[in-house]
Image (cartoon, rainbow, N blue to C red):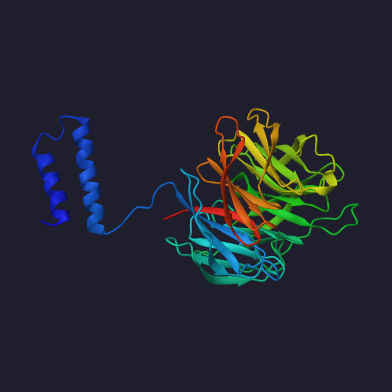
Amino acid sequence: MTVIQKFWGGASQLISGSIYETRQRSLRIAAVFAVASALFLGTAVAPAAEHLVWFGTYTGEGTKSDGIYVSRFNDETGELSEAKLAGKATTPSFIALHPTLPVLYAAAEFVGKIEAFAIDESTGILAPKNRQQVWACQLSVDPAGKVLLAAGGGVTCLGIAEDGSLKPAVKGSPGGALEHPKGGNRQKSMPHSIYPAAAGKFAIACDLNFNTVFVHALDTEKATLGLHGSTVLKAGAGPRHFAMHPNGKFGYSVNQKDSTVTGFSFDAQAGALTEIQTISTLPEDFKDRSKSATAEIAIHPSGKFAYASNRGHDSIAMYQLDEATGKLAFLGAEPIRGREPRNFAIAPGGKFLLAAGQYSAGVAVFAIDQATGKLRYTDRTVAVPSPTCIRFRPAR
């Protein structure tokens, strides 16, 4: 008798004996049929806790990197597999994922192009799809997957085709490398990041040199941007990256030059930011702030905690977040057990945080205390050459 026949035989016996007598018997029948169906289809379901995770890197002399790397991460145990080369690329320092399609986008920071890659969903290996000539150091995709936003020298909006490939920027439109207005600032505009907001109605951009957070009107159908408003931060802040709270009512810029985080309330209808707080990313006993600069910021999926990375101090700042007011309370700064945390990411389940040590060539795994938000090093660091960006996608 085959394995399949045994399963169906077991199902027949269950059916013949009053299958609705108890809830337990019904569940047993469902289990038998589920396993039998899987055997017939020859399919296996990946563990729900397992995710693919990619690492953008700097390539070139002294880095030992050949492009984008991939690992598997178990969100129950915190296990991170050995990193393997997913696809060759030149300085893919920042990466972004399409929200629904198996497509990854990479900014080749020093060569002025953005590349789209098709993802093998079982292995994470990447195959080139197409590229567009755009200077960029940071990327994001709108929630509907219609446009890719890029920052670097200017802010750019690229349409995304149905297969996930990139369309060229609309010529002569604000979508093509829009520069921020100079005002009284003689420095050159340096947008370091741009993100969709209000379900793709607006885009928020941090201009490090102009010390300003800009709000752009975003048209995802036409793939265009238009300047909508701006908020100037205190002198010397230098906004670098931005994160929205899950409730959409608050946003936070991490400020590179003075190692602070600025919190804002956000009016999604009007597209307006109002500053509510600025708080340090460093402990009080760290006196020489000139030796540290921030890089990344993220909000925990629960909305209760926030995190920001310190390069130089080489730590992740931890905050408790008041969901009623949007204000942050500093909890401390956890060392990353490496050097230069240019980027970090919270795993999809919210139980772990991965921190990239660019100069120490490793990615460290931290457990997140679900009650306090504090980080605990798990004694796991995986070698990745010159890691600069971390992005997760559930395994298929």
Judging depth in this view, the residue of 98 and 226 nearest the camera is 98
Q: Residue at x 60, y 67 (%)?
A: 67
Judging depth in this view, the residue of 38 and 314 nearest the camera is 314
Position of 388 compared to 32: left or right? right
Residue 187, given in percent of the width and then of the height, sits at 88, 57
Q: Residue at x 25, y 47 (%)?
A: 34
Q: From this viewpoint, which residue is outermost toward the front?
A: 379
Residue 146 appears in view: no
Residue 295 appears in view: yes
Position of 36 compared to 381: left or right? left
Residue 56, given in percent of the width and then of the height, sits at 61, 60
Judging depth in this view, the residue of 299 and 232 nearest the camera is 299
The number of discs equals: 0
Residue 342, given in percent of the width and then of the height, sits at 69, 53
Q: Residue at x 24, y 49 (%)?
A: 35
Say which quadrant the C terminus sits in: bottom left
Vertical order, 286 against 226 (above or below):
above
Q: Residue at x 42, y 61 (%)?
A: 122
Residue 9, given in percent of the width and then of the height, sits at 11, 48
Judging depth in this view, the residue of 55 and 150 nearest the camera is 55
Say which quadrant the N terminus sits in: bottom left
The image quarter in which residue 358 lies: bottom right
